[in-house]
Image (cartoon, rainbow, N blue to C red):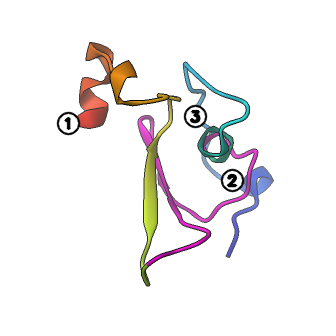
Amino acid sequence: MVEDPSKSPRSTPKPQRFEKSCAFCQIVVRERAATILHQDDLVTAFRDINPQAPTHILIVPNEHIPGIAEIEEQHGDLVA
């Protein structure tokens, strides 16, 4: 089941940093369809479109963080 972004009962997070070309960012703001299982102010969890196991769920930050070197003190709650 693919969630229709336009019929979401929950408000879409507005990430501080967003990369238009990032597939994960597009899923977070619901510009790209995904089976979203959970979404809060920090993270979005959704089913992988190419699962490598019977249950394969991706959990991504709602803010675009290009790599581990870009994690800052303000991301403490996210990485805890």
- In the picture of the structure, the residue carrying the numbered disc 3 is 13
How packed mark 1 is, by other alpha carbons closer than 10 Å (few <14, some 14-19, many 20 or more), is few
Report if residue 31 lies within the magenta region.
Answer: yes
In terms of sequence position, does the residue under pointer 1 or pointer 2 come before the other? Answer: 2
Q: Position of residue 61 (x, y in %)?
A: 44, 38
Side (left or right) of 76 relative to 35: left
Q: Amino acid at mark 3?
A: Pro
Q: Secondary structure at mark 2?
A: loop
Viewer-side residue, 19 vs 77: 19
Residue at the far left in the pictured view: 80
Q: Secondary structure at mark 3?
A: loop
Viewer-side residue, 46 vs 50: 50
Q: Position of residue 37 (x, y in %)?
A: 50, 62
- In the picture of the structure, the residue carrying the numbered disc 1 is 80
In terms of sequence position, does the residue under pointer 2 or pointer 3 come before the other? Answer: 2
The circle on residue 8 is 2
In terms of sequence position, does the residue under pointer 3 or pointer 1 come before the other? Answer: 3
Q: What's the magenta region? A: 28-52
